[in-house]
Image (cartoon, rainbow, N blue to C red):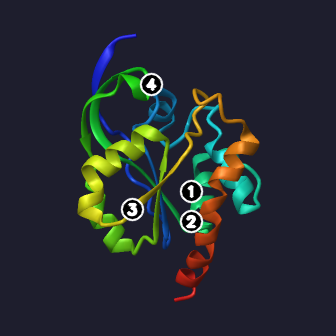
Amino acid sequence: MKTETLVHPIPPFFGGKPRILILGSFPSVKSRESGFYYGHPKNRFWALIARLCGEETPISVEEKKALLERHGIALWDVISSCTLSGSADSSIKNAVTSDIAPMIEKYGIAAVFTNGKKAHELYVKRILESTGVRDVCLPSTSPANASYGFDRLIKEWSVIKKYFFLSEISKNE
């Protein structure tokens, strides 16, 4: 697979009044093709979020956005551009990080979660100081993270549920 230098092609998603920000590293090949986050059919992100929210797994991009809005969840990636080969985080080089602090402030984000170790490492090293908001590192939902079965992911990711009530409060303001 050839190495490419890419600029992040998907805009951050901050629909509605988000209170939770989930940060990945950089979109996979399939996500770049679909034009939205977690586009690989074997990535467990959408099934996981739907289960935590007590809803059906969304299929279309519109359904995914609606699910996020209903539960106050924003999505973005820590990397705005990088050199990589395919989709593997391990191949990422020359990463330039996203300017996340203004969005956290603008939306009053209450909690930041990173989806996987690479996103967490870059957030801590290059973004945390500007945001002042510590992240919670969650295990990657990528199919490459085969050591985590779906039930184990649900258990680990359940921590985000305590922030759902903030989204309900925000909607009523």
Q: CA distance from mark 2 to mark 3?
A: 23 Å
Residue sitting at x 65%, y 53% = 49
Sequence-first tag of 1 and 3: 1
* Cα gap from disc 1 to disc 4, whole angstroms: 25 Å
Query: What SS does tag 1 mark?
Result: helix
Q: Is residue 13 left or right of residue 131?
A: right
Residue found at the very far top of the displayed protein: 1
User: Is 82 located above or below residue 57 in the figure?
Assistant: above
Ranked by sequence position, the earlier of labels 2 and 3 is 2
Q: Are marks 1 and 2 in contact (CB under 8 Å)?
A: yes
Q: Residue 69 shows which numbered tag?
A: 2
Residue type marked 1: Lys
Residue 134's disc number: 3
Q: Earlier in the sequence, mark 4 or mark 3?
A: 4
Q: Quadrant of residue 67?
A: bottom right
Structural distance between the alpha carbons of marks 4 and 2? 29 Å
Q: What residue would you read off at disc 1?
A: 65
Closer to the camera: disc 4 or disc 3? 3
| Residues at circles 1 and 4 in contact by the CB criterion of under 8 Å | no
Q: Amino acid at mark 3?
A: Arg
Q: Residues within 10 Å of mark 2 (few under 14, many from 20)?
A: some
Read off the residue under disc 4.
88
* Disc 1 versus disc 3: nearer the observer: 3
Separation of residues labelled 4 and 3 (CA atoms): 25 Å
Q: Nearer the viewer, mark 2 or mark 3?
A: 3
Is residue 91 among the parts visible in the rendering? yes
- What residue lies at 23% left-to-right and 62% top-to-bottom? 130
Residue 112, picture quadrant: bottom left
Disc 2, SS: helix
